[in-house]
Image (spheres, helix red, strand yellow):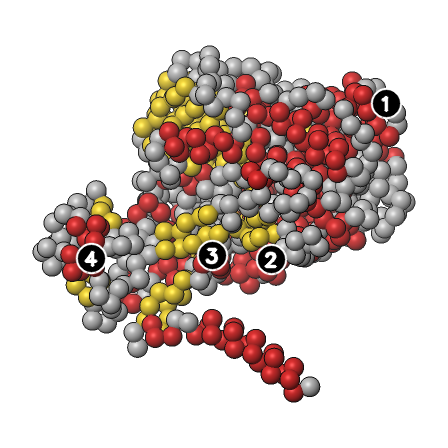
Amino acid sequence: MAWQRKILRVDLTAGTCTQEALNMEWAKAYLGQRGLATKYFVEEVAPSVEPLSPANKLIFATGPLTGTMASTGGRYSVITKGPLTGAIACSNSGGYWGAELKMAGWDMIIFEGRAATPVYLHLENDTATLHDASDLWGKTTWETEPALRKKHQDSQLKISSIGRAGENGVLYAAIINDLHRAAGRSGVGAVMGSKNLKAIAVRGTLGVAGIKDPKAFMKATAAAKKVLADNAVTGEGLPKFGTQVLMNVINESGAMPTRNAQDIQFDGAKDISAEAMHAPRVTDGKANLVTNQACFGCTIACGRISKIDQTHYTVVNKPEYWGASGGLEYEAAWALGSANGVNDLEALTFANFLCNEDGFDPISFGATVGAVMELYEMGVLTKEQLGIEAPFGSAKALTYFAGLTARGEGFGQEIGLGSKRLTAKYGHPDLSMTVKGQEFPAYDPRGIQGMGLTYATSNRGACHLRSYTVASEILGIPIKTDPLATEGKAGLVKAFQDATAVFDSAGICVFTSFAWTLVDVAPQLEAACEGDWSLDNLNVVGERIWNMERQFNNAAGFTAKDDSLPKRLLTEAAKTGPAKGLVAGLSKMLPEYYSERGWDTEGRPTAATVERLGL
Amino acid sequence: MMKSLHIEAAKCTGCLQCEMACSFENYGVFNPAKSRIKVFEFHDTGTKVPYTCTQCAEAWCLKACPVDAITKDKHTGAMMVNEATCVGCKVCTIACPFGTINYVADTGKVQKCDLCEGSPACADACPTGAITYIDADSTGIDRMRSWAAKLENQTVGHAD
Ligand code: SF4
Ligand code: SF4
């Protein structure tokens, strides 16, 4: 039993912490983390719940492989109803915090209600206590972490917290752990803020014992680690270049949404790429990238640690930003860079630091700035309103907006609502590059058709991490498909969605899936956990989780109409690159996808599907 | 041949596979809190440094122990704690300048790295080569080789 079989329920309204036994029947059907926490969530929360109300719940959940020697076994997810989308939200983070929670003896924490005044939770193995956090309110995550270590005189405390963005209701506020790892998307940080919950500080010294068959487990995990080490992407590409390995590849494939998706290739991509992060700067002769870094248990180590040039305008006389911290991942480099036409690597790194420091999602933030810049160029938004001239390509505007959004000042308050609400307010809703209210990330569906279907059907709003068909369409993993074709993508997207749901529920990082398939995951789970974790059953578990999320969204009011894409992607053809002349062919894929899923034409699981999956 | 743990901090990614391997080897549990090797992260510089007992030739802990519970293993050279003899007085933890021998409240004894009878689990688990178990007399050989390579380049240059 790789589960700890224990959950902590924290009623913030009443100020109580109670221990409950994990529902093992559910664990055997939904595995852990994303799947299992979503099961708890849909059983306990009405789909109509107002996301920022006390009736919404916020679950922090680990998986059975979290805190074990399975490679990348350090993940946790945050599950809630998202304020950006109104859909189920599930954001996954690495670093060390998730493993620490598991080591303290818990599978998950369910927060409910709302504290009257700011609080934080201190968890030391079995002992859970709520403390006053008034003195931490208004502080950044970078201030909160050392303050809590000092207060508890425990240098080994691991902390997950919100910054000012979460407090101020930025609808895409993130939850940050270990200074720069994020449960980044869909506004889980805003829900935490709405509950007056500032932080969770954990120290776990109990460890993870009770692996079902330790010998088999060590053998299975060692074999799986070898697969990662021998693979070109997980063994070489990611450790050396991080996810930024994609910047030039995607740009050359003509699939990089640029300047609010007006273009599909970015002339400045090379300036903000992995190669640029490695190159010595002209100013100080040092590279932006300092080193790579792993999350707990990870033998890939894709993380970027960067230092900003001390003479760069963003940090002159600000030594607090001179140290090393979390550098640019591909999605952030794209959102802060290409989406706005900005090619200043140091400015992007600075904006990314601010996203971590005050806890907000660089994808939604960057893409919203892209919409603001387009509105500025159209004359709809003016310098007077914005506080700065904001044409595409302005690094100064980008970093200025990042500061405003972090602090909740001026026009930053509007940027903090995301592009859907902002563009609607100024009369141009079609300029919002969102699905279900969430900004889509760094792959243009006109150049990678499968990603169009991925965004349209993602249960948490537009997202690349729900079915990363880029792997197949561009990198040929596990098989190469044509990125410009729509044929066969319905089945491909379904297969990726179901498999990813398993990765996200096991406690491991989805980046392992560049090298692993469920064939590699199954033996690790089988050795660790009781229950049937054969390949066949894992496919069913993944499909079950996907349909459960879908049912919640349907009940929350989403219909087939919401499985759509921004008009621009459907009507304005790509101007350059291999996809020149193409729009996103969503209508060619969606009906087939519904039928592959066993859903009716309205996108609802049929009675037969519900029964087959035991929902 | 006597071997010793060799640590190259620059290669460490901070994955903690070594800490889990250590606790699993000694206690059958994945628990960095029980690990005898510790990885320290220095955030401002981005450095990670694995640190454990270096098995001193003249060990402070061994000399300090009032009940002779610490002895040197003939084959591995490791300072070994005999749990049956140890009275948990913690004098060794005061004597050790490096902090690598520690009291365990659960057992009432001290613990330290014992080199896993000659096949250290941490070195085995480390995915990056930051920890290796090599000939104790030439732990510097790789570093010498990399500097020698610079000379080699120069030599080639001169011949032109
Ligand atoms: S692959 Fe990257 S994100 Fe995933 S666990 Fe490893 S370091 Fe963390
Ligand atoms: S296993 Fe190796 S790379 Fe990982 S933390 Fe330990 S020394 Fe560092």
Up the image or down, A563 lies above or below A510; here it is above
Mark on residue A240?
2
Same chain assignment for discs 4 and 2: no
Residue at position x 83%, y 33% from top? A391
The residue indicated by pointer 1 is A380
Q: Residues at badges 4 and 3 in contact (C-beta under 8 Å)? A: no
Same chain assignment for discs 2 and 3: no
Real-space Cα separation, disc 2 to disc 3, in angstroms: 13 Å
Q: Nearer the viewer, residue B139 or B75?
A: B139
Mark 4 close to ligand 2, CB under 8 Å: no
Q: Amino acid at mark 3?
A: Cys
Give whichever of discs 1 and 2 has the lower sequence position.
2
* Residue A313 seen in render: yes
In the rendered image, residue A78, in percent from the top left (x then y), is placed at: 52, 31
In the rendered image, residue A268, in percent from the top left (x then y), is placed at: 79, 48
Real-space Cα separation, disc 4 to disc 3, in angstroms: 28 Å
The residue indicated by pointer 4 is B61
Judging from the image, what secondary structure is the residue with disc 1 in? Answer: loop
Q: Amino acid at mark 1?
A: Val
